Each structure stands twice: as structure tokens, then as C-alpha cells.
Image (cartoon, helix red, strand yellow):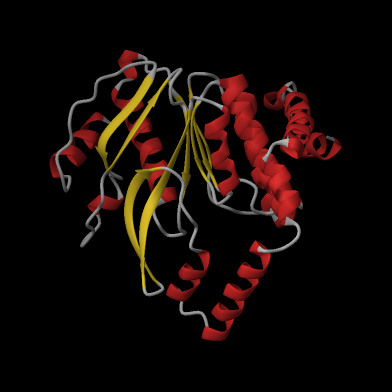
Amino acid sequence: VYTSVASVCYEGAAEYCRPIFTDDEIHLVGSRHPVLESMTDMSFIPNDIHMKKGASTFTIITGPNMGGKSTYIRQVGLIVLWLKWVATFLVLKLNILARVGAGDSQLRGVSTFMAEMIETGMILEAATEDSLIIIDELGRGTSTYDGFGLAWSISEHIITKLGSFCLFATHFHELTHLEQEYPVVRNFHVNARTDDGNLTLLYEVKSGAFLSFGIHVAKIANFPENVVAMAEKKASDLENFDGQEAFAQLENGVEIQKASSEINSLLDDFKSTPISDLSEDQVMEKLQAL
């Protein structure tokens, strides 16, 4: 392992530096993805991150698809994992728990969303204040309200009950309101620019929340013009839909408090389940019962 790390550092596209180890802080300056930056013709954009116990443990990342959110949170996880190898004799306590990607298991009757929930449930059971949790797009496989309610409640559980470091990439922009509720939450986004309706991805991580630009990404994927036009019209219609009053109520916390209470109760029940002693089928039965 040490020889491999030394080789990557020596042959890397840019210089590496010796880390300073602490138990209460993750501070990376100009961090890069060690695998992606080694690819031919790759010009990687470095980004910083600073998370500190009691001050900034929960980071929400918004921004356009293909903008670099997943790369950013994965490179932080990979760097921390790498440092755990290097720091074997220093007993680096931080452990890494990740919920990324999407996949199902048809043979077991597990949908993509169920797989996502099982993985998240296991994270909530195993995580401690010495964990780094990486969550990429939680709550996509169900209705918007259900998905947002789960994303909010799970985030709140991590913030208030676990105290773990957490990087949470999402397109639920309402989730960024957590920054107003809890002082340890920070909003960041991957930057982009629009010129004459064209989207330019800049891959820079900046402070604050940002839009998703989903329709712009569809244009990049060469969708037919009539499909894009209809998508823009429907998006505009939904922005003015009467249901916005109900959604505003959600944002004001009326329904969030109720949903959070119910979901936190479910999470507590699941966390008390001895998953390590159960088979995968028994875990599924427990989830379905809840």
C-alpha cells in the first residue's frame, strides 16, 4: 500500500503534500481526484473543503447534473480513505459510509429505491460521530414530497443525533433551508454559467445554493427541440401551480415537523434492529414491516 501511494504521489499530475492528522476536522486545500486527474488529456479543477466538529459538519451540495457534485464528494471520501491507509499506525478514527450510485436486484425483488433505503438504513445504524457519510441524490425513486421528506428527516437525524461529518449532494433545493435551522450546516454548489441559453459547466465548488439546470443538460444531450420546449413550458406551469401554497407550507416547516417526527420514529426503530445478526432477506422483511 505504501509503495503504491508513493508511486502515485511521485508520478501524479500535480504535487501532493504531507497531511496533518486531527480527529475533529477535515480541511483539504486544492483537493483533486487522484484517479481522474491521472487520465490522459484530463485538466482537473481542484476544490477546497473545510469541515469542523461543532462548526461545520454537514455540507449540502447543489448544482447542475454533470457539474461535478458526485466527483467532489467521492474525491473527499477517496482522499480520507487514502489517508486512513497512510495513517494506519496513527489510528485515524474516521470511518467512511457511502450511499452513491443506483441499482436494483430483480432476483431478490429489490427496487432501486428499496436498495437505496436499505443502504441508508444501514448507514444510520452504523454511523457514529467519528464517521464520514457520503450521500449522493437520496430520495429520487419515489414522489417528490416523499423523497424530500425522507431527505430532510435523514439529514436532520445525522445532524442532531449522530454528529457525523456528512457530504450530501442533492437536487432538493428546499433541503438548503437546513442551513437556517442548524448552525453546523453549510450550503455549497458546483458552479456553472448560462450564455444565450447555453450551459457552461465550470466544475468549481462555491458557497451557497444553486439551480439544477436539468433542461439545459437535456439540451446538451441533444434532445429534440420540441421535447425541450415542452419541458420548459411544463416547468414554468408547475412553478405557478396552485400546489405551490402547499409546498410553501412545507418550506415553512408545518408539514416538515410532522413528517420528521414520523420518519425519525421509523429510523429509531430501524436503528435498534441488530442488522449485523440478520440475513439480507430478514433485513428486507424488517423494512417492509416498518
Q: Quadrant of the C terminus?
A: top right
Rendering coords of residue 87 (x, y %): 31, 21
- Front residue of 72/100: it is 72
- At x 70% / y 27%, what residue is drawn? 275
Left/right placement of residue 267 relative to residue 19 reads right
Residue 208 visible in image: yes
Residue 110 visible in image: no
Above or below for 8 versus 64: above
The image quarter containing residue 73 is top left
- At x 31% / y 14%, what residue is drawn? 90
Q: Quadrant of the N terminus?
A: top left
Left/right placement of residue 213 relative to residue 235 reads left
Rendering coords of residue 65 (x, y %): 47, 59
State the residue lying farthest toward the right.
289
Above or below for 89 versus 34: above
- Front residue of 7/103: it is 103
The image quarter containing residue 34 is top left
- At x 43% / y 49%, what residue is drawn? 69
- Front residue of 115/231: it is 231
Rendering coords of residue 284 (x, y %): 77, 39
Left/right placement of residue 161 relative to residue 260 reads left
Above or below for 186 versus 234: above
- Front residue of 5/116: it is 116
The image quarter containing residue 180 is top right
Rendering coords of residue 25 (x, y %): 36, 21
